[in-house]
């Protein structure tokens, strides 16, 4: 939690088994959108992953989009045949033997920045536990230097949202009245599990 806006995407933080492992999927060669580590992704009818928006781009919408999981990097052979490992998918990359890693277990929890909608310094966000929200699509969405996403979650939804807030990160110097708290969330609208309603 923080008084500074510094979103870092979705970071795997907890699983009941103690194991958090990404699974191998693929991205279509020349797919024209950056996918950064920590970005939500969806599974298409073609069996490939894309950014988790309506059209697979950063100009798409997120409401009602079922997610597969959170992107965790990729590997591929580039146009010259050179093996490449990258923390993000570079937009428009031509590649073969493409492996895209994603945390797809619906029981995995993630830490993500959430803007305190009340009066920072006085209003606690505790009442947001159990509520749902969609992720906020940022542009450019992350850093091509580090490969890390800078997305976050948005306002509480009146109906089912993509993510459900299960609690907040308990860092020692943090407060639930901070302007930019770090929430712990689960994917609610998940490709492998039925969604639940807000509490």
Image: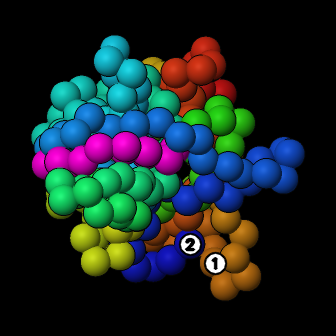
The answer to whether residue 61 of the structure is visible from this angle is: no
Which residue was labeled with disc 2? 1
Residue 186: percent from left, percent from top: 62, 40
Quadrant containing the C terminus in the rendered view: top right
Residue at left offset 84%, top offset 53%: 18
What residue span does the magenta drawing correspond to? 92-102
Quarter containing the N terminus: bottom right
Q: Position of residue 151 (x, y in %)?
A: 35, 57
Q: Is residue 198 left or right of residue 136?
A: right
- Depth check: give the residue in front, 19 or 85: 85
What residue is shown at x 47% (from left), y 61% (from top)?
113
Which picture quadrant has residue 152?
bottom left
Calculate the distance from the C-alpha at mark 2 to the C-alpha at mark 1. Answer: 5 Å
Question: Looking at the image, which residue is at 53% across and 66% down?
Answer: 181
- Residue 99 in the magenta stretch? The answer is yes
Q: Which residue is mark 1?
A: 174
Left/right of residue 182 with respect to residue 30 in the rendered view:
right
Q: Report which quarter residue 138 is drawn in.
A: bottom left
Could you tell me what secondary structure mostly forms the magenta stretch?
A: strand
In front here: 165 or 71? 71
Q: Give the x, y percent position of residue 9.
A: 43, 59
Residue in the image at 37% along x and 33% along y: 49
């Amino acid at each position: 939690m923080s008084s500074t806006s510094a979103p870092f995407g979705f970071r795997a933080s907890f699983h009941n088994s103690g194991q958090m492992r990404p699974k191998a999927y693929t991205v279509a060669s020349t797919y024209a959108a950056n996918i950064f580590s920590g970005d939500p992704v969806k599974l298409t009818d073609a069996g490939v992953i894309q950014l988790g928006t309506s059209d697979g781009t950063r100009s798409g919408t997120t409401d009602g989009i079922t997610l597969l999981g959170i992107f965790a990097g990729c590997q591929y052979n580039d146009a010259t045949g050179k093996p490449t490992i990258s923390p993000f998918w570079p937009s428009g990359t031509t590649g073969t033997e493409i492996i895209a890693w994603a945390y797809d277990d619906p029981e995995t929890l993630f830490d993500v920045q959430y803007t305190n909608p009340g009066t920072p310094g006085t209003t606690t966000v505790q009442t947001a536990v159990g509520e749902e929200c969609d992720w906020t699509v940022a542009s450019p969405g992350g850093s091509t230097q580090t490969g890390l996403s800078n997305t976050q979650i948005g306002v509480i939804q009146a109906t089912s949202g993509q993510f459900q807030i299960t609690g907040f990160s308990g860092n020692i110097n943090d407060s639930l009245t901070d302007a930019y708290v770090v929430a712990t969330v689960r994917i609610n609208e998940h490709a492998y599990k039925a969604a639940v309603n807000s509490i």
